[in-house]
Image (spheres, grey):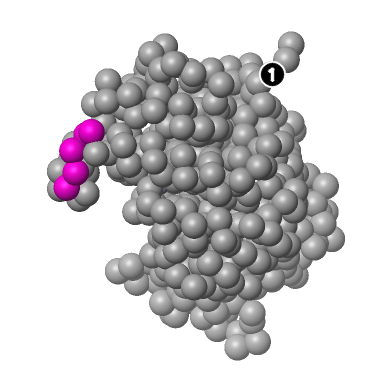
Amino acid sequence: MDRPRITIFDTTLRDGEQSPGCSMNVQEKLHLAQQLDCLGVDVIEAGFPIASDGDFEAVQRIAATVRRPVIAGLARACKGDVDRAWQALQGAARPRIHVFLATSDIHLQHKLRITREQCLEQAREAVRHAKSVFAKSVCADVEFSPEDATRTDVRFLCQVVEAVIAAGATTVNIPDTVGYTMPEEYGQLIRALRENVAGIDKVTISTHCHNDLGLAVANSLAGVQNGARQVECTINGIGERAGNAALEEVVMAMRVRGDRYPYETGVASEQLYASSQALAEITRVPVQPNKAITGRNAFAHEAGIHQDGMLKNALTYEIMTPQSVGVPDSRLVLGKHSGRHALALRCEQLGHQFERRELDEVYRRFVVLADRIKKVQDSHLLELIEDVVRGGVGLGATAADPGRKFPPATATLPLPRAATAAAGAGSSESRAAQPTGSDSQAEGRPGGTPPTNWFSGAPFAEHHAEQEDYLWGV
Ligand SMILES: [Zn+2]
């Protein structure tokens, strides 16, 4: 069966760059554009050329350097903007001018102070002008966006879309500018356009959804299900306010659930993680840890029953492999919810195989320690193993030893947050070391008064009892 091909339009460098703290200089934009090219996106919206000289230069340099994807430049619906966009894009192998004009009554009355008739005329004229700058080019690629489309009267929206198609637009984008729509509603809107606009079958319908209600990806997918064939999105979902639909989520939803979303994209999914990391590095805006697909916890399993299942067969808790999105491997974080199986494997990887009784003792101490420091690093585990192997140091003496690697227990736990001991099947030390980059973000235990030593059994007896199932049952 032929699966419809969805055009992935990346606007990280335009809409994404508009988010607070995410502005990039020309060099950084060029670097990211090259990564987006590796990722296989179809269109890169490189900037808004009239907005600033920096934006102009970035679009121009990306157009000259990145030759495979279409390079788009944004323009308001007026001659000056379109001309400036064209100037920046002239050197592109495949240029696209993206014209936008608000169409909702709220925007027309309060922002633009024009009537619907004036809006219709301005949209038509701007698209005509954009077409004309391509001169005799056979593929004059012009996209039109009725800004705030989802709050626009549907009949008027249909009129505008019909007018811009007649004027030569080749892609019609339907922005949910304020992140207000709901999946079913957005799907119906796309369907209404397909049913009511003359010439709509000759153009590509596009989605552009914002995430103010956390529905940007769901709305985009609803659009695709109803006939949209281009999705506008950004790496890590960055963008105005709550951001845009996250590219990696849209792509992987279609890939993992191809049964429900039988569509293809040209994205090389194994480049997703690298793209996310590149953006985070450039903007210094970290990816939220639990971010779908690219967050550092997206493939981490801590709960004992999950770890146990993962080690037996990754399919138990993994709907896609970390490798499929370019994460080196899944990480089993050793924490207080970890089970014996994961701990035993990690010990083996550290060169220690234990008899059942010894492992029981290591595990007992591990649970107590993990309760204090949340994530147990290899160095911690090694020290603990040493204690057990030596026949157990007196509980009180342990933390008092000044030569120990453990921080003294009286500290307020400014402990490495990234103390993630990897314990995935077939893992290597390099993998264990790889994700533990930043040690700077301390993770304290607010308000808690740590006991005087790490292995002080008494205060944790209760907790230990709660873990008995795990201690003996797995
Ligand atoms: Zn936007």
Foreground pick, 91 / 449 = 91
Residue 444's spot in the image, x, y percent? 41, 69
Which residue range is magenta in the image? 113-117
221 lies left or right of 138: left
- Give the x, y percent position of residue 225: 51, 19
Q: How many marks?
A: 1
Task: Inspect this view and state whether residue 209 appears.
Answer: no
Location of residue 433 (image quadrant): bottom right
Residue 395 horizontal/vertical position (percent): 56, 71
Q: Amino acid at mark 1?
A: Arg
Residue denoted by label 1: 3
For the point 62% across and 64% down, the residue is 60
Q: Is residue 474 above or below residue 358?
A: above
Q: Is residue 114 magenta?
A: yes
- Left or right of residue 423, residue 285 in this image: left
The spot of residue 27 in percent (x, y) is 63, 73
Q: Is residue 132 visible?
A: yes
Residue drawn where x is 62% and y is 34% of the image: 7
Quick one: 213 or 106, which is closer to the camera?
A: 106
| Rendered residue at 55%/56% (across/down) | 86
Tell me if mark 1 has few (under 14), some (14-19) or many (20+) residues whose alpha carbon lies within 10 angstroms of its own: few
> What residue do we see at 46% from left, 40% from top?
128
Circle 1: element type: loop
123, above or below 45, in the image: above
Q: Main secondary structure of the magenta part?
A: loop
- The quadrant in which the C terminus is found is top right
Q: Is residue 254 above or below residue 196?
A: below
